[in-house]
Image (cartoon, rainbow, N blue to C red):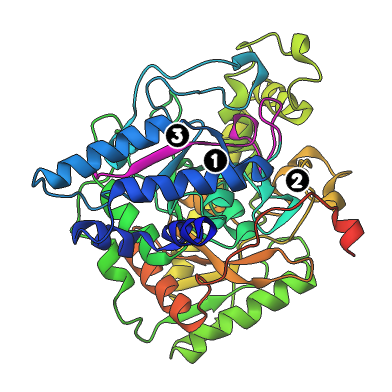
Amino acid sequence: MAAIELAKGEDLCWIPATELARLVREREVSPSEIAEAAIARIERVNPALNAIIEWDPEAIRARARRLTEELDGGGEPGPLHGVPFTLKEACRVEGTVETLGLVPLKGATSSETETFARRMFEAGGLFLGKTNMAEAGYCGSSTNHVYGPTHNAWKQGVSAGGSSAGAAAGVAAGLGQLAEGSDGAGSVRIPAALNGVVGLKPGLGRIPHTIVPARFETFLGYGTIARTVADAALMLDVLAHPDPSDPLSLPDDGSRFLAAAGEELGSLRVAWSPDLGFEREVDPEVAAICERAAGAFAELGCEVVEADPGWDNPEEAMWEGIWKPAYATMVDLFDWDAYAGQVDEQLVQVIREGAATSALDVGLALEARGRMWDRFAAFMGEFDLLVSPTLSRGAFPADAYCPPELADEPLRRQALGWLLTYPNNMLGTPAISVPAGFESAGVPVGLQIAGGLHAEALVIRAAAAFEAARPWADRRPADPEPATTLEEDR
């Protein structure tokens, strides 16, 4: 009987956030019941997955009791009342760990709670804990020297992607319906693609952030991770309001993102690009899966045309004008030589290369970024959406920095050579990764749907229509088993 009751309890972990919030509002389930289900599942699944790296069962129970008491006292429930969520380790919550996965910061905690977290709390969300990430968020891997690797929710020993690794793997494995991730080159969409969940990167300023001390970074922002498009949209509705802490945050424009997820798609003009015109080969299996998935838009009545913006390969502009300069300020943060073997060598190389980059190199890269925008804006004058694979590669080992076929390439290629995500960061435009299928290794593949400036509602509408045509949210990964390697499986 106890096993049956546990199974029923853990079923609460798989109910979509939109539905779970309704059940709480209608008093069909209490936040305390939800908390017990979440705690049981974390205790059972997380030790092998390593998605959540800081959590406190008693603190979760205490939060759930407060939320339950608010309802019992006649309080008006928030839009996320009782819905479990996690925050990436880098997202500041007073008194919680904030190491960025860096050994020199081991034991550090936050002294403040930033806007993203505060809004989730105010909406009634049930905070479960902090999730694992790549060191300093600098790459698409799922490991660091403080906490070790997060495993893919679908396969032990396989990367969960990054840098928001634990966020996506946790959602995929039923460790919270909603998760926060930050995205500077794809760090929401990369792990969402590899774990078979939804990863939404809104456009510049849609969600206020104070992720880095520089308040005018135009490539970086928060995103939402969930198992359904509607859940990601519900989360965005809670978060998408201006805040004085972020001078680039957008004013309210009346957009209602959950409502957009329920609207008819209409007849759109969709550009399908198998590689975004990049000078790289997309894995044939990944390309085939995504091409079949993109065909859903033709079935939905859209005109689908194979096309890409025709920009020059933006890899160099991203690397020289954005990525290296973003990490250059860390050069004197620690004596990096003293931590040799305890910090990723590639991270230290990025930091030092950034510090040595000339203003001329940065300026030329930023001019290239401007030309990239000109081409994209003209292209989106002809199309409503740009659809592509999210990544050019699929599964690779959990402790690896990049797919093995890129391991001997220059650092720039290792970091960016398998991503089709970072152009949207350079452009400040919205994009979402949705599950497109599974490769032969048993790991999910993501399809990226991108829109033009301020087109979050359209991107969500398209993703929800795709989800209805190619449903996936009822699929659950098996609970983790001892790790095997990809080579053993093959």
Q: Which mark is residue 398?
A: 2
Q: Residue at x 64, y 16 (%)?
A: 331
Q: Residue 110, can we see it?
A: yes
Q: Residues within 10 Å of mark 2 (few under 14, many from 20)?
A: many
**Discs 2/1, front:** 2
Q: Which one is in front, 349 or 344?
A: 344
| Amino acid found under the numbered disc labelled 1 | Leu
| Amino acid found under the numbered disc labelled 3 | Pro
Q: Which mark is residue 197?
A: none
Image: magenta residue range: 122-148
Q: In the rendered image, which residue does mark 1 sit on?
A: 366
Element marked by disc 1: helix
Q: CA distance from mark 3 to mark 2?
A: 27 Å
Q: Quadrant of the C terminus?
A: bottom right
Q: Residues within 10 Å of mark 3 (few under 14, many from 20)?
A: some
Q: Residue furthest front?
A: 1
Left/right of residue 292 with respect to residue 302 in the rendered view: right
Q: Residue at x 45, y 87 (%)?
A: 302
